[in-house]
Every structure is written in structure tokens, then in C-alpha cells.
Amino acid sequence: RHEGPTSAERAAHWLARQPQGVAIIRDATGQPHGFLLAVTIEQATEADLAVDPAVRAAHHYLEHTAPLRPGETATYFRFWLAADSYQDVSPVQSRLFTKIVQHYVATPGLAYTFIPCARPEFWSPVFDYASIPRLSELDFEVDGRRYGLYGHDWRIRPPLAWLEMMGDREVGLETSRPPLPAEQLVVLSQSDFEAAVREALRAFTQANTLTANPLLSSRLVVDKAGAAASKSERVAALQNLLKTAADSLQHAPRQAKLYRALHHTYFQPAATQEQAAELLDLPFSTFRRHLTAGVKHVTDLLWQREVGSLNPP
């Protein structure tokens, strides 16, 4: 009734394929007054994407512009409407938006969300206020009506930081954590992240070299140092993160040998790895095995924090 037969067919498809993404707003008598259908993009098959070009375009955008990393998810709020007033301002619409915000906060590993609007210009002030940018390149047309898209990368500004910003705006305060421009943050793939950790370990005692490490612009380091931190403060934060991750090896007797290999190689390095092995009274092959396992521990632990920082405790 509101969007036409093609939208109805696509809604029916997603209802069958991802029913877990449906939320219904009901009145006091139990009658449905509002409808929200959230599509989990990475779970969509090629057949699904062939049915709905709007979701297909977002899938392509993620692949080429903002790739998902292991453990991350993206949501397309494909349909949202009130039974009587469609997407106009109404109590039902407010409850739908509340459902969407709850999804932001409660979804583990949420990396990206997309929201289409039948009247994108009308909703522009609301999304501007919420710092959710317009993605006009992902606009689409169905049955002669054009829909405008808004989207947000939650790896750039995580949900709790976004809620803090919105709270400050509501009471007229300047945010206590100034927004960090997107170009100052990097979203590294897992392989690139691991390579950057290895580079940072090798340069641990060389602060000037660390200033070029891409981890300085990762969410991991920015959360640790603060969005307004200087480069030297970010270097110090990165060193602290590396050292803390390595220190955790000392708590398990069987892993302490890995910590010692890291310590004599990176934190208080011997002149060569051969000399480090001699200090530890180990065959060089054994030392190398311990060092490799220690580096993997540090890398894995920091990667978990990087991805987990999407929804910090």
C-alpha cells in the first residue's frame, strides 16, 4: 500500500529469508501499527542480492569501501514504516527509531548500518544532528519512487561514544570527546593489523619510527590515547598496549618463557636474537619458537581488543 508491488515482493523475500530481523510495533490491543525489517548483509546470498538491488549495492559498497573484518556485521534497515503514516513523524516512527538505536548498542561487532528514506531531504536535519552521513551513491528507485540512503561506520564512532555525543547535544554541551574526522582513522584488515603489530614490536624502542605505524590511527590506539591526543601520546599509548599484552603472558607459568623471548627481543633487546637466546640459555631454534608464539599471543590479543572496541564495556 505504501511502496508498491515490487517493494512488497522484496519484503516478502526478506521475511522468508531473515525473519529474525523483523520487529513489530503493536498498540494496546495487540494490533500491528509499525514494522521494521533489518537485513544482515553478510548473511545475504547471491540469490538474495539478485532479488534486492538496494541491498546488493550496500553489499558492494562494503566490499570495496568499508570491508567487514572477521567477527563484524552490517545491518540494512530495509523497511521501516507506520501502518497509517508510513515514514512521517509519529509516535510509531519514534518507537521504530528507538528499536534502531537499541540495535546499535546491543549488536556485537556491529560495523556498519544503512537506513533508506522515501523522503531523504525531509529527514536530512535529523540524520545530520545524529552525525549519520548521507550516502547518495547508494540511492535506489523502486516502482518510480527514489529512496535516499544514510549510513554509519560504527568502527569510526562506536555506539557508546555516539550515545555520549547525542547526550551532550541534547543538553546543549560540547562533547567531552571531540569527533575524530573519518580520514584520521583507519580500519585495518586482520592481516594488515597483524603486520602493523609486528612492525610496532620491532620498533618498540624507536619512538620516531613508531610515528609512521598505521596502528596510531586505529580505533584501538585512539580509544586508549583519546581522540585529541598528539602523535607522541599515541605512540606512548601503542607502546603501553604492546607491553600490557605481552605482560599478560607472565600470569601463566607455561607462557612465561614466551614473555621472556619478547622481553629480550623487543622491550629490552639484546644486540641480536642469537644473544637473546644465549641470555635465556636456549637453543636458537627453541628461542625462535618461543618468540613466534609470543608475537602471535600479542597480535591475537590486540586484534580481539580492536574488534571488541566496537562495543566497549
Image: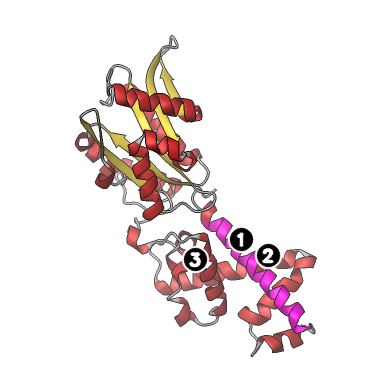
Q: Is residue 190 left or right of residue 296?
A: left
Q: Which residues are magenta?
A: 283-306
Q: Position of residue 207 (x, y in %)?
A: 48, 80
Vertical relation: 148 (above or below) 197: above
Q: Position of residue 159 (x, y in %)?
A: 44, 45
Q: Secondary structure at mark 1?
A: helix
Q: CA distance from mark 2 to mark 3?
A: 23 Å
Which residue in the protein does label 3 denote?
192
Which residue in the protein does label 1 denote?
301
Q: Are marks 2 and 1 in contact (CB under 8 Å)?
A: yes
Q: From this viewpoint, is residue 168 visible?
A: no
Q: Which mark lies nearer to you, 2 or 1?
A: 1
Which residue in the protein does label 2 denote?
248
- Which residue is farthest top? 29
Q: Position of residue 180 (x, y in %)?
A: 35, 58
Residue 236 colored in magenta in the image:
no
Q: Determine crowd level at label 2: few under 14, some 14-19, many 20+ residues with C-alpha closer than 10 A.
A: some
Q: Which mark lies nearer to you, 2 or 3?
A: 3
